[in-house]
Amino acid sequence: GAVVSQHPSWVICKSGTSVKIECRSLDFQATTMFWYRQFPKQSLMLMATSNEGSKATYEQGVEKDKFLINHASLTLSTLTVTSAHPEDSSFYICSAGGNSYEQYFGPGTRLTVT
Amino acid sequence: GENVEQHPSTLSVQEGDSAVIKCTYSDSASNYFPWYKQELGKGPQLIIDIRSNVGEKKDQRIAVTLNKTAKHFSLHITETQPEDSAVYFCAASKSRGAGGTSYGKLTFGQGTILTVHP
C-alpha cells in the first residue's frame, strides 16, 4: 500500500501555545487528506477533510479556528492546533487518498499539552 | 449520517483458532467497506477491503464477507497467530464524484480488541 508519514511522532507543549503537525504522502498524489483524532481506547473521529488547494471541511463540533488545516500541495497537509489546552491532548492521525477508494493512514502524532 | 456498529468489543482466541468480527451499517448508499488493524501507538493499517459489487473477498488468512441486503459485513481471520493481536476497526463510506472512482468519508466502528493466546 501507499506510504503516509507524519511529523512529529510525538510532541509535548505548554498550554496556550500552538503546535503544527505535518502529513505527507510519500509515493502518490493525495487529492484528499483527512484528519482524525483518537482518544485512548476509542475509535477514530474525523475532524476535517481537506482537498488540495481548497478550504477544509470540518465536522460538526470541530472548531475550525482552533484546528487550522492547510493542504497546499498534493503531498502535504498540515494541522495546527492553536492555543492548545490539556483537553486537546490526543492521538492525531491523518489519512490520504488519491483517485481510488482506499485511504492510507499515517503513523499518528501523540500530542500532550501540559 | 452513516452509523457503524461493531461487535464484539473484545475477542480472545487460542492460537490456530478462527476469529470473526461483525459490523452493521445504516446507510444503504455506502459501497466501500475497509478493515483496519491498529497496533498500540500506531496508525491504522488497511488489511482488506470490499466494495458493494462483490459478496466476498479473501487474502490468505483474511476474508471479508458483505451482505448488502442485511447491511452487515464481517472479517474472518483463520489460523490466528499471536501477531494478529491488535485492535481491528471496520469502516464504511460511499463514493462521491463522477464514475464512482473517488471516495468519501469513512465512518468507523467502535473497534475490537483481538487477543490471540499462544
Image (tube, coloured by chain):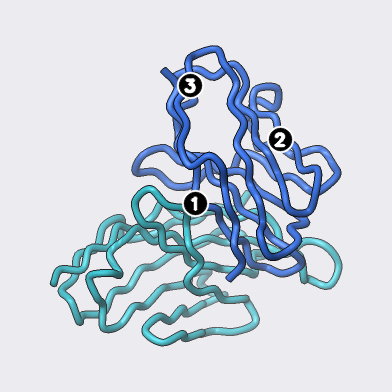
Residue B80 image-quadrant placement: bottom left
Vertical position of residue B78 compared to residue B72: above or below: below
Q: Which residue is mark 2?
A: A69
Residue A58 image-quadrant placement: top right
Question: Residue drawn at (20%, 82%), measured in percent from left and top?
Answer: B16
Vertical position of residue A69 compared to residue B47: above or below: above
Distance (Cα) linking label 1 and label 3: 20 Å
First along the sequence among labels 2 and 3: 3
Q: Quadrant of the C terminus of chain B?
A: bottom left
Question: Which amino acid is tagged 3?
Answer: Cys
Residue A33 on image: x %, y %:
69, 50
Residue A112 on image: x %, y %:
43, 27
Q: Secondary structure at mark 3?
A: strand
Question: Which amino acid is tagged 1?
Answer: Pro
Asked whether disc 1 touches disc 2, contact meaning CB atoms under 8 Å apart, the reply is no
Mark 1 or 2, which is nearer the eye? 1
Question: Residue drawn at (54%, 73%), measured in percent from left and top?
Answer: B49
Query: Color of chain A here?
Result: blue
Q: Which chain is cyan?
A: B
Picture disc at residue A107? 1
First along the sequence among labels 1 and 2: 2
Disc 2 sits on a residue from what chain?
A
First along the sequence among labels 1 and 3: 3
Picture disc at residue A13? 3
Residue B110 on image: x %, y %:
41, 51
Whether labels 2 and 3 share one chain: yes
Picture disc at residue A30? none
Question: Residue drawn at (46%, 78%), measured in percent from left and top?
Answer: B64
Q: Secondary structure at mark 2?
A: strand
Question: Residue drawn at (46%, 85%), measured in percent from left and top?
Answer: B59
Disc 1 sits on a residue from what chain?
A
From the viewer's side, name the closer residue of A75 and A87.
A75
